[in-house]
Amino acid sequence: MLVNKVSNDKYSINFCSKNNPIPHFRIMTKKGALFVKELTDNDIADERNLKEITKFFADNFINNTKDPSLIQYKDPKNYNKYISMLDRIKNYYKQMFIDNDDNLSVLEARNSVGELCGAVVTNTFKDISGLFDNKTCYVDSVAVRKDYRKNHVATILMDKAIACSKGIYTDVFLASDNMAVPFQLKNGYRIMDYNNKPERAVIDKINKFRGDFPEYITFMDKRLDENSEPWFLRLYNKMIK
């Protein structure tokens, strides 16, 4: 697929990722062009935008997994639970924007009529378990609308967000739904080795709060700087001090 840059006069001023701003660009698909932009602080301040991207990600989560804790939201009888789930995720993203260290990137891809067709969120790794590493990029969320899949949209969005952060991060980490593991392997991600003591310690610490590994989630990573200490070793060394 072709990726075309689009001029952007406001580039670098208000984007969330002030340390690594991403100019607008196009992704050419079989269904036409998708116009990609990085959300600005003003975009995030608009509650409508936050609700839209929250629903986009949430619907992708529940429709592309075998995890019953997510599948339950597809049942019309659980509509009220679904609304509550959306509100929790929205507040999670809102807090992420509040805590932004100027490395947060939120890319959205829209078609010619303005429909949201793809999105990705990357951020400095800071886990609910208390683990934190300012040299690790966390791919928090990625989704593509079903009719735009198999156009490399997710790959391009992820690569674009991560490429602009190579001078900041040495590693990338993500928690992949098991159904998406083959896709992530094709994109150069590695399944973390649970038999390796440092990796197991980090995985166990994260999963203590998640609880979906290994039944539904696979932890994966990718090196950006092969000369640096792996991210999980940095975390492990902090844990055992």
Image (spheres, helix red, strand yellow):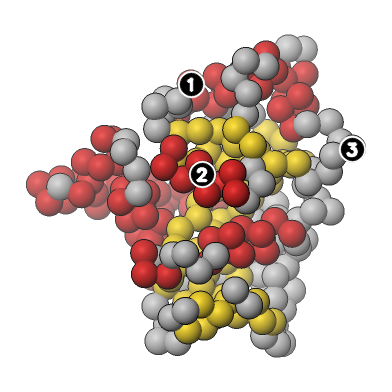
- Looking at the image, residue 19 sits to the left or right of residue 84; the answer is right
Task: Tell me residue 149's x, y (percent).
Answer: 44, 65
Residue in the image at 47% along x and 64% along y: 150
What residue sits right under mark 2 in the picture? 182
Q: Are marks 2 and 3 in contact (CB under 8 Å)?
A: no
**The C terminus: image quadrant:** top right
Under circle 3, the secondary element is loop
* Residue 86 visible in this rendered orientation of the protein: no
Q: Which mark is residue 24?
A: none
Label 1: few (<14), some or many (≥20) within 10 Å?
A: few
As drawn, the label of residue 227 is 3
Question: Type of residue at label 3?
Answer: Asn
- Numbered tag placed on residue 208 in the rendering: 1
Mark closer to the chain start, 1 or 3: 1
User: Against 211, is 46 above or below?
Assistant: below
Tell me which residue sits at (53%, 38%) in the image. 175
